[in-house]
Amino acid sequence: MITFITGNEHKVKEAENIFQKFNIELEHIDLGYMEPQGTLEEVAISGAKYAAEKLNKPVIVEDAGLFIKALNWFPGTYSSYVQETIGNQGILNLMSNTINTKDRHAEFRSVIGYCAPNIEPKIFLGKVEGSIAFEEKGNKGFAFDPIFYVQKKDKTFGELTLQEKNQFSHRKNSLELFANWYKCIKE
Ligand code: ITT
Ligand code: NA
């Protein structure tokens, strides 16, 4: 059993679905932890360390974000703040005002931080490439999903079911790296 520390219910549902395949049982605690302003990796390491010590058990945390090339990889580590303030429409406006308006390449990145009492934290990075849509589409998923378009599905993440998103999302990739490693250390 592993404890996922997050305040985001959508992340929990996605993780439960991934972990089923690995027979890893997931417990969810919304502990809350300080997020230092830093890279996804720094946030994941410090969050995992803090939570493992505080709860005295093995935990994972996740720090994720949307990175847009034409905006010099903004919002990146500011993704939560940007989502809560200017939102998807704000991102679409920035995209139509940038000089690189034709380059809509973007990626989601997810870093899972794992830590257990008296063990050094470990991190697992997952990414998915896509592009910023010209308008919001779909009402599934959460946050930036309706503006994140994936060519091979010809859909935004907002138009995908949880199971479809979990076939190739950034979170799928980071969680699977973690789960494969975790299975090994448990054996
Ligand atoms: P935690 O409690 O786990 O920190 P959070 O929602 O604050 O939950 P992050 O700190 O990882 O999550 O913030 C990343 C932000 O990036 C998040 O608030 C969303 O706006 C966005 N984001 C991350 N993953 C996403 C996904 O799969 N789809 C859409 N937006 C995503
Ligand atoms: Na957060």
Image (tube, rainbow, N blue to C red):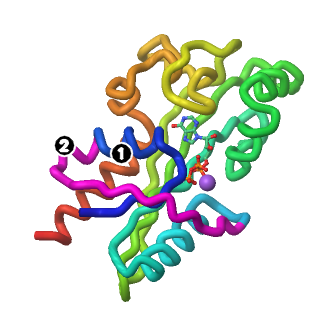
Q: Which residue is mark 1?
A: 15
The span shown in magenta is: 18-36
**How many numbered callouts?**
2
Which quadrant does ligand 1 occupy? top right
Label 2 packing within 10 angstroms: few (<14), some (14-19), many (20+)? few
- The image shows residue 21 at horizontal and vertical percentages of 18, 43
Residue type, label 2: Lys
- The image shows residue 79 at horizontal and vertical percentages of 69, 44
In the image, taking residue 154 as reference, residue 146 lies left or right, namely right
- The image shows residue 139 at horizontal and vertical percentages of 55, 17
Q: Nearer the viewer, residue 128 or 27?
A: 27
Q: Quadrant of residue 132?
A: top right
Q: Quadrant of residue 113?
A: bottom left
Q: Is residue 30 magenta?
A: yes
- Above or below, comparing residue 59 to residue 19 in the picture: below
Q: Is residue 84 magenta?
A: no
CA separation in Å, label 2 and label 1: 10 Å
In the image, farthest residue toward the left: 187
Q: Residue at x 32, y 54 (%)?
A: 177
Answer yes or no: disc 1 within 8 Å of ligand 1: no
Residue type, label 1: Ala
Q: Residue at x 73, y 49 (%)?
A: 78
Q: Residue at x 48, y 73 (%)?
A: 51
Badge number at residue 21: 2
